[in-house]
Amino acid sequence: MQQNIVFSEQALELQAIARKIADEVVRPGAAEHDEKHKYNMEAAKALAAAGLMRTWVPKEHGGHDAGILALSLVAEELAKADSGFGVAFAVNALGSFPIILGGTDEQKARWLPQIAKGEKFVAFCLSEKFAGSDVSGLAVTAVKDGDDYIINGEKKWTTNGGVADIYTVFAVTDPSSKSRRLSAFVVEKGMPGFEIKKIENKMGIRGVPVVETHFDNVRVPASNLIGGREGLGFKHAMMTLDHARPGVAAQAVGASQGALDLANVYANRRVQFKVPLSQHQMVQQMLADMAMKTEAARQMTYAAAAALDEVGPTPKNSKMAAMAKCFASDVAMEVATDAVQIFGGYGFMEDYPIAKFFRDAKILQIYEGTNQIQRIVIARHLIREANELEHLQEFIPVETQETYGAETPEPASTT
Ligand code: CAA
């Protein structure tokens, strides 16, 4: 697929601001925040003060409306300094997308200006203990009661939980329906019955809280039902993930570049057998592979983001977003693993940031859709696209198109 990747002046400005904040406020505090499992509020406030929380918010609601490519450039810079902080930033966009993509005008006007100013942080409550990949299996319920809905149940792995003020929560409103089972609601911090319970003790991205959110008869006004109609939740969740996945890919690109830069500097300083490591061909090969993979991931990420900015959500762009997320996060894990290898024994020590890059990379292959789910999404699109390739049919051996014993071959399955 051909794609123009156009970097607007504004996107490049936002990238430069993000790089400065990453260098001055994020990287210096990364080790301490990781060790203490502490959120970098100073850096978050710096992002808000510099206007970076406006990046993805529409202009009419106080945002820059700079697009997914700009969001990706910012997330990449932050993740290069600290992968955990990359997601701490990007998850605000993830949590806002249901409102931006599916909210009513009144809902957008109510919440988006506060998000744009950085006065309120956002979280996205989709996953549950018994339903992660299988979104249609959610169990949290929202039952209509007069002018309100009553929400009950538990959500798992809410990133930014506790820090966030606004939570977009997916709940079952019609258990009898398959395709219109879910609806999304805005739940605000402090609503009676809404509590942050278990704060997870994580392998990586320790600087951003990931928590269980509990809903015990939480009464929310019907005006908090995103889109104002029941049954749109699954679609809102999928559209949100399509828009957010290039941002995860960008976090992965930043993480790869951060690990590669450290490994590169180390390989040029560390002397073994009387020459720097970078003079040994086996290390050169590793560095070259790390650089190639990182650059390929970057181009794929920018292409996926630019495609969304240019033509909006389409099946092809959903596939591109899944491909970028999957490829870039696999690359981040590989590059971080090789970077640790180049650091040798030092790489295994928590005294140096490279171990953190390794620990942080793993979750990129899991959150916002595991890479197995991304491959399912990609394969389903490919199977559908095969129908557009009918002109190639004449080149396929005829006998492979006939099924012995069956008059009509089964159509290709997409499950
Ligand atoms: N955009 C719009 N609509 C979509 C869509 C998309 N991308 N994908 C599917 N739909 C629609 C379908 O058209 C279908 O609509 P109809 O019923 O009207 O025909 C409906 O949604 C159901 O689609 P599927 O049959 O494809 O659904 P499925 O049950 O097979 O699930 C899935 C598809 C891709 C596996 C999906 O469940 C999925 O993406 N799972 C992964 C969930 C995920 O990413 N979770 C991450 C949690 S968030 C997180 O990690 C945040 C954090 O902490 C940082």
Image (cartoon, helix red, strand yellow):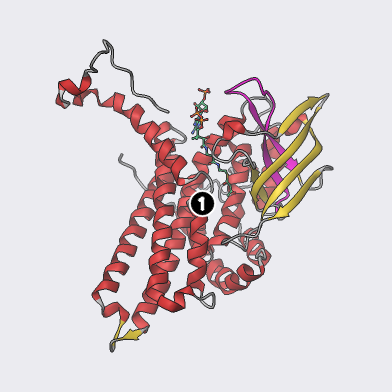
Q: Which residue is drawn at 61% across and 53% down?
A: 53
Residue 70 visible in rendering = no
* Lateral position of residue 208 relative to residue 396, left or right: right
Residue at horizontal 60 percent and vertical 32 percent from the top:
137
Magenta residues? Answer: 164-187
Q: Is mark 1 on a helix, strand or loop?
A: helix
Percent position of residue 316, x then y: 39, 34
| Residue 368 percent location from the top left of the image | 53, 45
- The three-letter code of the residue at mark 1 reads Leu
Left/right placement of residue 28 relative to residue 220 reads left
In the displayed orientation, state which residue is furthest to the bottom. 274
Q: Name the residue under label 1.
A: 71
Q: Is residue 350 above or below residue 116?
A: below
Q: In the picture, which quadrant includes the C terminus?
A: top left
Q: Is residue 166 magenta?
A: yes
Does residue 52 sit above or below 375 in this rendering?
Answer: below
Asked whether the viewer can see residue 316, the reply is yes
174 sits left or right of 371 in the view: right
Near-viewer residue (171 or 90): 171
Task: Please say if 74 is above or below 27.
Answer: above
Q: In which quarter of the image is the N terminus?
A: top left
Q: Tell me the crowding category of disc 1: few under 14, some 14 to 19, or many 20 or more residues within 10 angstroms, Cα based.
A: many
> In the visual, does 125 lie left or right of 254?
right
Q: Position of residue 82 (x, y in %)?
A: 54, 65
- Residue 26 percent across, percent down from the top left: 58, 68
Q: Quadrant of residue 398?
A: top left
Q: Indicate the quadrant where residue 403 lies.
A: top left
Q: Residue at x 69, y 39 (%)?
A: 109
